[in-house]
Structures are given as C-alpha cells and as structure tokens.
Image (spheres, rainbow, N blue to C red):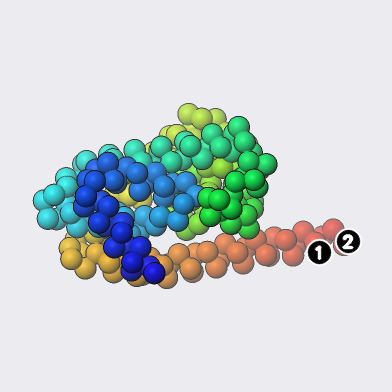
Amino acid sequence: MTELFVEYVTAFIAMAGYAGLVVLMAFESMILPVPSEAVMPFAGFLIFEGKFTFHEVTFFSTLGSIIGSEISYLAGSYGGRPFIRKFGKCLLLDMHHLELTERFFNKYGDKTIFASRFIPVIRHLISIPAGAGRMNPVKFTAYTVFGAGLWNTFLAYVGFHLKSHWMIVRKYGELVDLVVLGFLVAGVVYLIFRYKTRSKH
C-alpha cells in the first residue's frame, strides 16, 4: 500500500508540477496522511533531472506547508476540540495522536511549532492546538516558515543527491519516524505515570 501511495504521489507531482507540490505539502501540514518523506525527495530527484529548480522547490513546498498549517490553525482557533471530535473521523484524524500533540504543545510552548516539523505525527497535528491555544499568529507563521522550510529543503537536497535512489529516504524515514514516535509515546506514558503517582501521595 505504501508503494502504491508513493506512486500516486509521484505521478501527481509529475503531472501537476509545482502546483502539485503545493497541494501535497499543504495536505502534509494538515491532518491528511501525506508523508513529506515521499514528496520532497522525489522533488529533489526532479531537480537532478532538470525538471524542477532548487529555489522553486523550496519556495513552493514551504508555501504549501504554510497554507496547510494556517488552515489547521484556523480550525483549532475557531472550531476547537468540538470541531475536531465531530469531523475528525471524516478527515482520518486519530484523537489519540491529537491528544499526544496537545500535551507536547502545552509542555514545550510556542517553539514546538518549529521543532515539530522534524517530528513524525506531531508535525501533521501541531497547528490545531496552536490555534486552540490562540498562539500569536505572526509567531506561528514565522516558526512554520523556518521549520517547514528547513525540513523541506533538507529532504529535497537528500533526494537530489540520491538521484534515482530517492526512495531510500522513504524507507529509512519510516524507521526513524517509528523510533521518534516510540520515544514520544514513552515520554507521555512516563509523565502520566508520574502524575498519578504524585496524586496518590
């Protein structure tokens, strides 16, 4: 299924060009399961082939990330949790992952918007608690631009140098995602255990 999904992603980019890159990265920054590890390395490969340019890939991918993040921010700001609970299933949103992201945002504050761009699952959802928490929209956009811009550029750069072997990024990216997610879940479980232990005393 993963390979089939990647085929659709790459075919869409090849057909739609930069507009396709904007759309896919907007989805990636929302709650739709579009992995940047599949989109950006392929864009890097297209740079190698001379079909895309590095500056335009960076610009349009980051533009897509901003659009998707702003939409999620507005959903969190104006709809909040009731909106997410009502429509989350239609959008393939896992409420457990959202709660994990909310704890992450509440614990580490505004800077999580930057850091989350490098963390699996969290990066898809972080804009919702930021909106619900009424984070300063200028700071939110600035952190999004810097974080998403760096992440997208890095993946495109790797895809450019790997050339036709760009799919390696997706393969190992999944392993890294699982490891990082495992640490996050373990951290949350530890915090919950610690809280319950303290409350008993």
Q: Looking at the image, which residue is at 40% across and 38% down?
A: 66
Q: Is residue 142 above or below residue 13?
A: above
Q: Amino acid at mark 1?
A: Thr
* Image quadrant containing the C terminus: bottom right
Judge left or right: residue 151 versus residue 81.
left
Q: Looking at the image, which residue is at 36% across and 55% down?
A: 36
Residue 146: horizontal and vertical position, in percent?
Answer: 38, 41
Q: Amino acid at mark 2?
A: His
Residue 27 visible in the snapshot: yes
Whether pointer 2 and pointer 1 mark residues with C-beta atoms closer than 8 Å, the reply is yes
Closest to the observer, 109 or 87: 87
* Element at label 2: loop
Q: Which residue is mark 2?
A: 201
Q: Is residue 55 above or below residue 3?
A: above
Mark drawn on residue 64: none
Q: Which residue is mark 1?
A: 197
Residue 107 visible in the snapshot: no
Residue 166: horizontal and vertical position, in percent?
Answer: 24, 64
Judge left or right: residue 16 versus residue 139.
left
Q: Residues within 10 Å of mark 2 (few under 14, many from 20)?
A: few
Q: Looking at the image, which residue is at 11% across and 51% down?
A: 50
Closest to the observer, 170 or 103: 170
Q: Is residue 5 above or below residue 123?
A: below
Residue 143: horizontal and vertical position, in percent?
Answer: 45, 39
* Element at label 1: helix
List the single residue furthest toward the front: 90
Judge left or right: residue 127 versus residue 132.
left
Q: Residues within 10 Å of mark 1 (few under 14, many from 20)?
A: few
* Image quadrant containing the N terminus: bottom left
Residue 196: horizontal and vertical position, in percent?
Answer: 80, 61
Quadrant position of residue 110: top right
Disc 2 versus disc 1: distance between alpha carbons?
Answer: 7 Å
